[in-house]
Amino acid sequence: MTQRFNLKAKMGFAVCAILMLMSVASMGYAQTVSLTSAEESWLTYLREEEKLARDVYLFLSAKWQSRIFKNIAASEQIHMDAVKTLLDRYGIADPAAGKAPGVFTNEELQSLYYDLIQDGSVSLVEALNVGVFIEETDIDDLNAGIATTKRKDIITVYSNLLAGSYNHLDAFNANLARQ
């Protein structure tokens, strides 16, 4: 059963990644219109928020040797790459550029990273709860980001990230149910 779930989860992550990259790649035209300050703020924030998810999951993967964290960390890298494509398209500086795992430009995210790895270090159950928290937060933030824009390319990327976050949330909840 676990092996079947892991295969299904991997396939879901792969399909989501392919769809996200296809949607971003299909919009490869150059943008000449500038973004609103809200659009720019959400892009830079979400780039680092996806990095936070990836970095926490990498830490928890090493700590607990649980495949779910490794698999979802790989998916979060794809999410980071999708947002980076938008930053590049609109000529926005990447807040994650050159930052080692666990290092963030945004001070709130930096503090949250420390809190999450501390909480996730208590037990595997607490680590899975950290995953639930991250994905629920991502869902809320992506919905807020979608509400600030009418740009089709940004909405498409955020919507794909949102679908991925719902898949991740389901995976964490399924693993919690088995604990």
Image: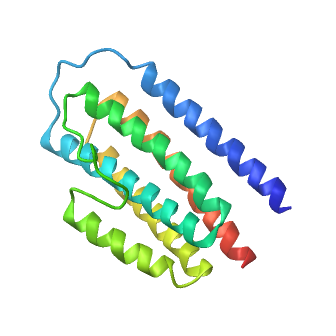
Q: Is residue 93 left or right of residue 63?
A: left
Q: Where is residue 70 in the image (x, y as percent from the top left)?
A: 59, 56
> Would residue 167 be seen by someone viewing this image from the given angle?
no
The total of numbered circles placed on residues is 0
Question: From the viewer's perspective, is residue 52 above or below residue 132?
Answer: above
The residue drawn where x is 34% and y is 73% is 114
Q: In this view, does 6 lie to the left or right of 127?
A: right
In the displayed orientation, state which residue is furthest to the right: 1
Q: Where is residue 127 in the image (x, y as percent from the top left)?
A: 54, 75
Q: From the viewer's side, name the closer residue of 155 and 5.
A: 5
Q: In which quarter of the image is residue 112?
A: bottom left
Q: In this view, does 132 lie to the left or right of 2?
A: left
Q: Quadrant of residue 137?
A: bottom left
The residue drawn where x is 20% and y is 65% is 107
Where's the N terminus, which quadrant?
Answer: bottom right
Q: Is residue 23 left or right of residue 145?
A: right
The residue drawn where x is 49% and y is 65% is 59
> Would residue 22 be seen by someone viewing this image from the given angle?
yes
In the displayed orientation, state which residue is furthest to the bottom: 122
Question: From the viewer's perspective, is residue 120 above or below residue 106?
Answer: below
Q: From the viewer's side, name the closer residue of 21 and 99.
A: 99
Q: Where is residue 109 in the image (x, y as percent from the top left)?
A: 28, 64
Q: From the viewer's side, name the closer residue of 31 and 50.
A: 50
Q: Position of residue 157 (x, y in %)?
A: 42, 36
Question: From the viewer's perspective, is residue 31 above or below residue 148?
Answer: above
The residue drawn where x is 32% and y is 47% is 47
Where's the C terminus, which quadrant?
Answer: bottom right
